[in-house]
Amino acid sequence: MRFILVALMVLFSLSVQARIEIHEFNDPAKEALYDELVQELRCLVCQNQNLADSNADLAIDLRQKTYDMVQAGSDKDEIVDYMVTRYGDFVLYRPPLKSTTMPLWIGPFIILFVGLLALFLFIRGRSKAQPESTHTKQDLEKARKLLEDDQ
Amino acid sequence: MTRKQLIFIIPVLLFVVLVGFLAVGLKLDPREVPSPLIGKPAPDFTLPVLDDPGKIITPADFRGQVWLLNVWASWCSGCRVEHDLLLRMTENGDVMMVGMDYKDQDADARNWLRQLGNPYQLVVVDADGKAGIDWGVYGVPETFVIDKQGIVRHKHIGPVTEEAVSGTILPMVRQLEAES
């Protein structure tokens, strides 16, 4: 009974209202660009959230800045550049491919390759370690004799 | 070494390597995002002075001297932690420390300085946080070292510590001051 009560309370509890400001766009393309950007830019305060999901003060400011720039007609590269010159590549959820981020991009493939190589060597080693038959010639001879005797 | 021995030793070695990575990972602070500003000219701002709102300050006013910019706010608990250290850093008066009061109420900021002491030669007010964005501020307190040419040389994120002050910041200030 108590369980059902608790379950009902959880079910009907007032959902926490997120503080989301309303932005109006004069162009659907701009709205799409804004949506794309706030999804891809990281909130620096709560590092595992993007700007769209975060309610941190800084995220609100950066959303506002993004909105202002989008409305003013900036394109995606300009806005991303603006953020990167201030906060570094870390502000991007998808880091650009350059020498410092190389390990990040190709590391997984190297690990995959090493794994496949290890698997290949392991399988080959195992098939070699097990010769076709472990019986000696004498054993086979003996077996054949036994079979012939039976007939 | 036989094949059998290898099979037991390799996982142990892999485990040791993994533990090594995890140990290093534990020591790294993910909050310390490297600043792209290091080595670049200090971002501009045009901000009023806390005690004299009619007066406007820009970074160009500090050209020719080494200065510290400490971004703080009265609502910031980390700022309270570092406050005594800031006071000690500037008590001799040989370190130029500018405060940037970030997204704060002027009255609260003045109260804070009256109660806890004022380590700043000058406090500029960034009420809406726009200058903070230009400086890449994402959490107060943050402390920047700017050289005579107006280039950002160092950024400390979070409350300054004893070792950051005596090990990095002050030696750097001295060294930069010695440069022409």
Image (cartoon, grey):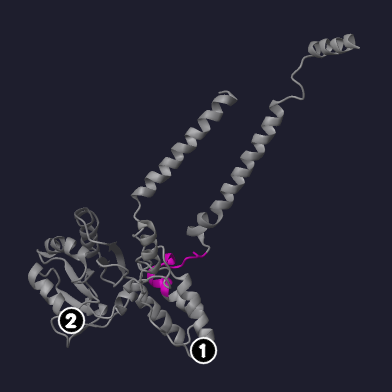
Q: Quadrant of the C terminus of chain B?
A: bottom left
- Part of the protein shown in magenta: A83-96
Depth-wise, is mark 1 or mark 2 nearer the camera? 1
Q: What residue is at 51 percent from the left and 62 percent from the top?
A: A98
- Counting from the top left corner in percent of width and height, residue A46 is at 36, 65
Residue topped by disc 2: B49
The dot on residue B174 is none
As measured in the structure, the alpha-carbon distance from the residue carrying label 1 to the one carrying label 2 is: 40 Å
Element marked by disc 2: loop
- As drawn, A50 above or below A134: below
* In-front residue for pair A22/B134: A22
Horizontal arrangement in the rendering, residue A27 relative to residue A44 (left or right): right
The dot on residue A27 is 1
User: At label 1, which amino acid type do we have?
Assistant: Asp
Q: Is residue A84 magenta?
A: yes
Element marked by disc 1: loop
Is residue B41 visible from the viewing direction of this image?
no
